[in-house]
Amino acid sequence: AKSMMQEMCSTMAINKLKQDRSPMKNIMDNIKRLKDQGRKVIGCFPLYPPLELFHSMGLAPVTLWGLRDSLPRVAESDRHIQPYACSVARRLMEFLLKENSSALDGLFMYNACDTLRNLPEIIDCGLADAGRPPLPIFKMHIPAVPPDQTDSRPYLRASIEGLIGELEKTCNVTFAPDKFRRSVSLYREMRELSKMLFASVADGSMSYGEFSRIVTEGWFIPVEDQLLVLQSALRDNFRKKTKPSPKSPRVVVSGILPPPLPMIRDLENAGITVVGNDVASQNRALHYSPPAVDDPAEYYIDFYHHHYPCTTLLHSADRRLPAIRKLVSDTGARGVVFVGEKFCEYEYFEFPYLEQILKEMGIRALLLDISLDDDENTAAYTTRIETFAELMHSTV
């Protein structure tokens, strides 16, 4: 009976996601459901927020990273942010200025890059210009220095403890160690199930596009519902498990965001199998959960210091090249597809070094440079992807 009830709950959670395929309507409907449940919603930006902390304090975190499918135009944002800023920042601003800020009870920010660290002040000005009330913005600073060179733990501890105090004061909530341990357990399970689901992509039983959709939509629903959706998807793929063709070119996908869905279809139509994931919004975000402890500062010191290396976490930059080399070797990939977010200086700084390392390893590389307008106009990339696939086939 318990198993049947879980199956029914899982089906209901999935049906909620599929009721309307309009991405923005789904996002706002999910936020409204959270508000109807009496929960305060915190818009989290950028990618690696302290989700467990928010959840344990009764707050509902939603990750606003990307919003690629939801906001193809950024007319309001362009009044406040230069066009040479990345589309990630421009879409976040557009989301807030399109009267969606009223759906949030606060916004969380930290110093991921030069553009993002300046957004709080721009957001305040933009909302004021639109005649809307200010939005509480909770900030945290993650030290950019390597922890083995400079002991940044006391600074990071103070930053996390300050965040907890600000949340308690502004949102009228209280931190409790037992609830924090429970939230840590839920998010660890979500990350583990997500990694298991990606294994279905690597073994050919799930489309990489479907995996990307499930992970992205999970940002806007409670972690409890994420678990139900992931469990259902894993059951479905276990039943239809298949193996990719042994001649299928195997690639690692890397970037701040996954390729737009038309590009993913081009990759898969060309017979390419994605066997490795170095996407910031996917494996980099899902890779590591520290052991559960009562002290959230100790937990997040571990979380950020041992996080999968990412260009948005500057202290981890020195570990990027060895991590890519290991990922390619472990997966047996013969190529890497880099999805470059235009104007993201941090990602583009490492591309030349990565390409050189891959060349020395005999691995082919394809750089797809994505700007705001390219999310809809991807036809120009189809020929490049097909040519890359043909070259990959010739070396399989």
Image (cartoon, helix red, strand yellow):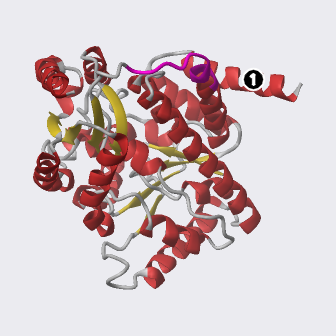
Q: Position of residue 93 (x, y in %)?
A: 32, 43
Question: Is residue 98 or residue 298 the one in the foreground?
Answer: 298
Quarter of image, res 231: top right
- The residue shown at (33%, 62%) is 313
- The residue shown at (76%, 21%) is 8
- The residue shown at (52%, 15%) is 20
Q: Position of residue 259 (x, y in %)?
A: 28, 31
Instruction: Sort mark 1 into few (<14), some (14-19) or many (20+) by Cα contacts within 10 Å.
Output: some
Vertical order, 157 against 113 (above or below)? below
Residue carrying label 1: 7
Question: Is residue 254 or residue 70 the one in the foreground?
Answer: 254
Q: Amino acid at mark 1?
A: Glu
Q: Position of residue 97 (x, y in %)?
A: 35, 39
Question: Is residue 240 or residue 301 the one in the foreground?
Answer: 240
Image quarter of the C terminus: top left
Quarter of image, res 338: top left
Residue 25 is at least partly visible in this image: yes
Residue 145 relative to residue 194: left or right: left
Residue 67 is at least partly visible in this image: no
Instruction: Confirm whether the magenta stretch covers residue 239.
Output: yes
Q: Which residues are magenta?
A: 235-244
Image quarter of the N terminus: top right
